[in-house]
Image: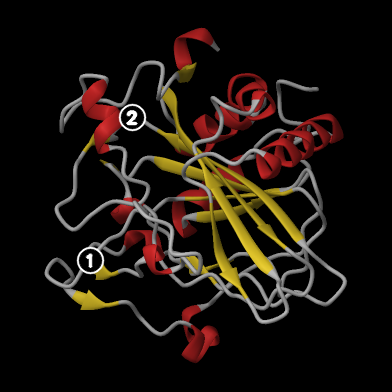
Amino acid sequence: MNRAPLTAVTSHQIETFARDGVVLLPNMFDSGWIEHLREGLATNCKNPTARARVWDRDERGRTVFYDSQAWQQVEEYGNFVFESPAAEIAAALLGASKINFYFDAVFVRSPGTQFETPWHQDEPYWSVEGFNTCSIWMPLVPVKAENALCFVPRSHLETKVLKQYNFGDLNPDSQVAVDSVDFDDAAEEAFPDIDGDRKKWGVVSWNMQPGDCVAFNSRTMHGGSGKLPPDQGLEVFTTKWLGDDVKVNFRPYGMDPDHTTVMTAAGLVPGDRPEGDLYPRIWTASAN
């Protein structure tokens, strides 16, 4: 399995990421990494973490499975964090001097699932704040543009606090201690109705093969993935990477995933750089 991307990140892709807050990166990861992650995913689904839950279960029994922060429990995920090209890709796009790993998340949709991901931004939910972030969204099976995650280019430049969706409501099994947010008092504006006029918002998505990925700024509006054909499921592995300006921030309206407890136990306080065993520094400019 390659430690470097199969295809070098180009200056055009770096410019696109900076301008649009999202870029398609074809052919970045070799087949060895895809198979390794799929092995890890099989293990993860059989032995989910305490954060795992079903996001949706319809009348036909079709589900959307979600788990997060499993990299210390699933060996294959940990190998990917430390040894894959992902940190190098994030560093190239961000022009960063250092890259720390934040967390992983997996999404498994059974064939024919019709649930669509609500539109949102990521960073407002997080226990950190900063503009210099990169999420890498990787399908482990082929996916068509109409079923893949969708994005609003240049929406990462939005500075207002928008009323974000509470993903804690996606809990048909009524699990306890699920992270929740409540933006009612913090939001300056309602979240826009992007599905009401996708052309107006310039929504983009792409046909993708295993080995491709989409990198996006954590403030980029995204959602809309779903409505799969009856014979098609979807397996996605995502990783979140932190660049130079990111600091710990505990948000009063809630966080999802909420890292307050583990950060506090590790001695981190608001304003600190996320570091240590939980948020390892994977890449530095001086070492490359």
Q: Examine the rendering and report whether any part of residue 28 can be seen.
A: no
Tell me the number on the disc at residue 182. Answer: 1
Q: Quadrant of residue 124?
A: bottom left
User: Which residue is more in the foreground, 192 or 285?
Assistant: 192
Q: Is residue 277 above or below residue 34?
A: above
Q: Which residue is mark 2?
A: 244
User: Regarding mark 1 in the picture, which secondary structure is present there?
Assistant: loop
Residue at image coords 22%, 65%: 161
Q: Amino acid at mark 1?
A: Asp
Please, what secondary structure does the residue beneath circle 2 have?
loop
User: Relative to residue 185, is residue 10 drawn left or right?
Assistant: right
N-term mark: 2 or 1:
1
Residue 79 placed where, x, y %?
Answer: 66, 21
Q: In the image, residue 253 lies at what x, y percent? A: 18, 58
What's the CA distance linking mark 2 and mark 1?
A: 28 Å
Q: Residue 8, percent across and down?
A: 70, 33
Quarter that holds the C terminus: top right
Measured along the vertical axis of the image, is residue 252 above or below residue 85?
below
Decide if residue 87 is on the left or right side of residue 94.
Answer: right
Circle 2: residue type? Asp
Q: How is the image coloured?
A: secondary structure
With 267 as the anchor, is 176 left or right in this view?
right
To which quarter of the image does residue 248 belong?
Answer: top left
